[in-house]
Image: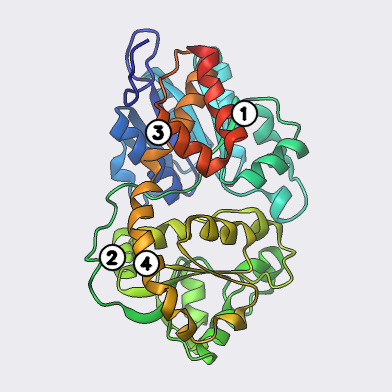
């Protein structure tokens, strides 16, 4: 077999397989995968209920308003040769719609449905709604966002289809900056937050209730700035003392992040009893990494372990331990210099092979060669057992 490390998976006619990324809310994780796939040489299509940032990467991008439009788009994509459909995140019922079209067209042997589980009600809210159960039931393969979530859901749902995990890395070159430029001595947070005073959100997603956390950080003497992913939080967090920005274009936000000194990965999980935070790896830690920000991680054990493993920030047992950051100055330069190495290593392009191996296997196609350095990198990142499980898919189809 040729050493085609960087070549795409080919179909029965020796053409690169075609892939579609689907999601009601077409989040940045979808776009990150699509960018990496495009660099390998795949034709990638996208679909969501609305346009969103980054969808210009796709060869085509479809929007839908109802079930009929969704199903017609799936049918058309199958007719153009798409072999892999990946349904991303919530809600879950559109995954079942996708399976229904594949079945009705009689192409289940050639077209496969993959589920990328960003979030799970079973983990987050301790119950399994019917649409989540049905989503797992129709899957030909599963992608997880962290290893603990993979392990927990595999056991809970008795998963018997191929699966793999890939973190939400940023893409190579998404942002460049002058590493020697001065940075504002401030903490920055980017992402969603519960609107202050919304009891319904606080009950369902307590870990995202950040008002009092940001207020305390300010009271400890820090300048705190927040790029909020939802307008209702932006409207209700002003009296925390933090500087607030409304939902911001992704590239604009990434450029802005390079002006700060530290990135916050902190959640309302002081009792460490919120499974979603206990087990997950976040998007924001990789955004901070690419922007050159040492991460301040607190009340999020899986992120804390990752930060310590790669030496890309600082971890804390309690919010008060952060103080006003002055005690971090002695170690800041060392961590910052290490980030300049890690931000080039921890990118989606270096790990997209995990999905390629999965796709080749579920389609019954010839796998691709994996070079020694790639194997070593994956073993360090995910552990030997998981990496060998991932690349074993290759052995079974080569």
Of the image marks 4 and 3, the number of the one nearer the N terminus: 4
Describe residue 42's horizontal placement relative to residue 117 as left or right.
Answer: left
Cα separation between marks 4 and 3: 25 Å
Residue at the image position 42 percent from the left and 25 percent from the top: 370
Assign a secondary structure to mark 3.
helix
- The answer to whether residue 59 shows anywhere in this view is no
Residue under circle 4?
336
Residue under circle 1?
139
Q: Nearer the viewer, mark 1 or mark 4?
A: 4
Describe residue 172's horizontal placement relative to residue 129 as left or right.
Answer: left
Cα separation between marks 2 and 3: 31 Å
Sort mark 2 into few (<14), some (14-19) or many (20+) by Cα contacts within 10 Å.
Answer: some
Assign a secondary structure to mark 1.
loop
Sort mark 3 into few (<14), some (14-19) or many (20+) by Cα contacts within 10 Å.
Answer: few
Residue at the image position 42 percent from the left and 80 percent from the top: 329
Of the image marks 2 and 3, the number of the one nearer the N terminus: 2
Position of residue 90 measured from the top left corner of the image (x, y, whole percent): 58, 47
Cα separation between marks 1 and 3: 31 Å
Of the image marks 1 and 2, the number of the one nearer the N terminus: 1
Q: Nearer the viewer, residue 260 or 26?
A: 260
Residue under circle 2?
255
Vertical position of residue 36 compared to residue 185: above or below:
above
Q: Nearer the viewer, mark 4 or mark 2?
A: 4
Residue under circle 3?
373
Position of residue 367 measured from the top left corner of the image (x, y, whole percent): 45, 17
Position of residue 394 measured from the top left corner of the image (x, y, whole percent): 50, 19
Describe residue 135's horizontal placement relative to residue 26 as left or right.
Answer: right
Sort mark 4 into few (<14), some (14-19) or many (20+) by Cα contacts within 10 Å.
Answer: many
């Amino acid at each position: 077999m040729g050493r085609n490390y960087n070549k795409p998976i080919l179909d029965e006619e020796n053409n690169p397989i075609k892939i579609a990324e689907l999601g009601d809310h077409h989040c940045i994780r979808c776009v990150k995968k699509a960018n990496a796939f495009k660099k390998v040489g795949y034709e990638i299509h996208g679909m969501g209920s609305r346009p969103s940032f980054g969808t210009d990467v796709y060869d085509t991008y479809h929007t839908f308003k109802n079930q009929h439009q969704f199903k017609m788009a799936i049918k058309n994509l199958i007719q153009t040769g798409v072999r892999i459909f990946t349904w991303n995140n919530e809600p879950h019922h559109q995954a079942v719609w996708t399976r229904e079209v594949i079945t009705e067209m009689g192409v289940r042997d050639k077209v496969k449905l993959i589920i990328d589980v960003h979030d799970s009600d079973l983990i987050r809210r301790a119950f399994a709604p019917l649409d989540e159960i049905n989503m797992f039931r129709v899957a030909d393969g599963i992608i997880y966002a962290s290893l603990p979530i993979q392990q927990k859901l595999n056991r809970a749902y008795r998963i018997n289809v191929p699966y793999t995990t890939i973190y939400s890395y940023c893409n190579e070159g998404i942002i460049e900056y002058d590493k020697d430029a001065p940075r504002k001595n401030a903490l920055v947070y980017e992402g969603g937050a519960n609107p202050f005073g919304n009891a319904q959100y606080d009950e369902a997603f307590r870990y995202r209730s950040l008002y009092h956390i940001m207020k305390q950080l300010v009271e400890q003497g820090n300048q705190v700035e927040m790029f909020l992913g939802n307008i209702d939080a932006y409207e209700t967090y002003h009296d925390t003392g933090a500087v607030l920005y409304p939902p911001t274009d992704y590239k604009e936000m990434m450029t802005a992040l390079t002006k700060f000194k530290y990135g916050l990965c902190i959640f309302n999980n002081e009792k460490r009893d919120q499974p979603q935070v206990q087990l997950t790896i976040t998007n924001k830690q990789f955004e901070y990494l690419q922007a050159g920000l040492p991460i301040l991680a607190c009340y999020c054990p899986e992120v804390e372990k990752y930060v310590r493993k790669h030496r890309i920030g600082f971890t804390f047992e309690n919010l008060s331990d952060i103080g006003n950051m002055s005690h971090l100055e002695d170690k800041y330069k060392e961590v910052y210099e290490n980030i300049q190495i890690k931000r080039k290593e921890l990118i989606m392009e270096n790990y997209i092979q995990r999905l390629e191996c999965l796709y080749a296997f579920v389609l019954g196609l010839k796998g691709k060669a994996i070079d020694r350095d790639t194997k070593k990198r994956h073993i360090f990142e995910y552990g030997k057992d998981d990496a060998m499980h991932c690349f074993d898919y290759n052995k079974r189809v080569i």
